[in-house]
Amino acid sequence: MLAKVYLANRQYEKAVEVATAVIGKHPLMQARFGAVVATTPGRNLFWDLHRPQNVHNSANTETILGTLDRNDLPDEVRTDGLYTMRNYHPAWWNARVRDSQAGRGTIDRGAVYDTLGRGNSNLRPSNYYLYDIWTDKDDLRRKDGNWVFQEELIYNNPASVDFGKPIDPRNFGALADTFQHYHSFPYYITYVPQATTEQVPNGGNGDWYVFRSAETYLLRAEAYYWLGKLDLAATDLNAVRSRAGAAPVASGAMSIEAILDERARELFAEEHRKSELVRVSYIMAAEGIDGYSLETFSEHNFWYDRVMATNNFYRDHVRWGSSECRISPYHVLFPVPADVINTNTLGVINQNKGYPGAENNLPPLTEITD
């Protein structure tokens, strides 16, 4: 966290210093571990890393900070579950998933349902994450066994003529239904079973990473990048890539985009992506990089340009139901809540530009007078 604060304040050398101290105490895991999962066939180290029971395993040197959320804790100190399967898995079980005879091809019960969960695609990944960033066929984070690819989803309704066959999206009533009901997902990250099969498989209780050293390597890589030390930035980026079996990136190919791509590969459902992009955007505006500036931050910023370049939903204004995917540059910042502004009767709290009420903004005070 301190490294991120130093980055946000453009104190890059200090970010390097504190990140180095953390990395020295938390080396990356390099071998499979965990009492049970280490012997699970068809998996690899990344499966082990993301088992909730391994977040605080004494063998896991990578954990810096994690949450505690376990089935055996009292009700008052645990959540209703992580809901990872509900949020990130497609609604493959839904009645809209039709078979070749227009019958219901999938149902919400049985072994497949318990394993894949009651997905609803509330946090549906874009093509950027599902396809674009996976350029290395040897990357362990993308290997079959860690992922469930859409082609592996099957009709699980015993009454269907296509029972046991792969789901065919051409049978859907509308191609747009694939948005919610048919896409791949990183099962090694999102699979968190319930305590019992009697519970709805939304994604149960489990410990979760807040900070781990793989991210710290990428934070230090970013600090080196801003300092112009591209060889050191590449070394840190490649520490994460080599652990995943991916080919190294040359120092001449280092860019903030390369670092963000690696963060996406390594930290899906773990990093606070918007916060990271906004921090990078502030740095670029403060440094005057690529024509960005703090004076026009809400009208022209890296966050908006990056999202529009990488997210096909916003770029193509994809519609789902009555909603359409649209953003504007000023959405880089969230609005200040109206009740905060309205209840401050002895002064003026400005609204972020672009939101209603910003027309009432006043220049900030530069002097304190009696």
Image (spheres, rainbow, N blue to C red):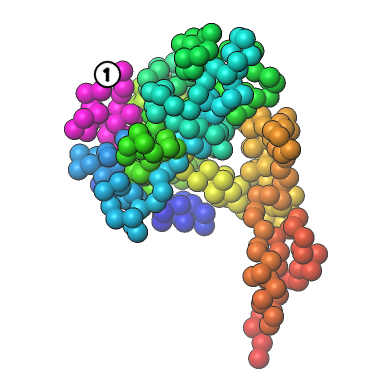
Looking at the rendered structure, the secondary structure element under dot 1 is loop
The quadrant in which residue 76 appears is bottom left
User: Is residue 361 toward the left or the right of residue 258 in the image?
Assistant: right
Residue 355 at x, y = what percent?
74, 57
Q: Residue beneath label 1, please?
A: 41
Residue 317 at x, y = what percent?
73, 33
User: Is residue 134 toward the left or the right of residue 70 in the image?
Assistant: right
Q: In which quadrant of the rendered image does the C terminus lie?
A: bottom right
Residue 256 at x, y = what percent?
54, 37
Does residue 206 appear in this view?
A: yes
Residue shown at the point (70%, 60%) measured from the top left:
352
Residue 29 part of the magenta segment: yes
Residue 291 higher or lower than 370, as above or below: above
Does residue 27 appear in this view?
A: no
Residue 27 higher or lower than 159, as above or below: below
The quadrant in which residue 198 appears is top left
Viewer-proximal residue, 322 or 59? 322
Residue shown at the point (23%, 41%) measured from the top left:
57
The quadrant in which residue 59 appears is top left
State which region is magenta: 28-50
Residue shown at the point (64%, 83%) measured from the top left:
368
Residue 34 part of the magenta segment: yes
Q: Amino acid at mark 1?
A: Pro
Residue shown at the point (42%, 43%) measured from the top left:
82
Q: In which quadrant of the rendered image does the N terminus lie?
A: bottom left
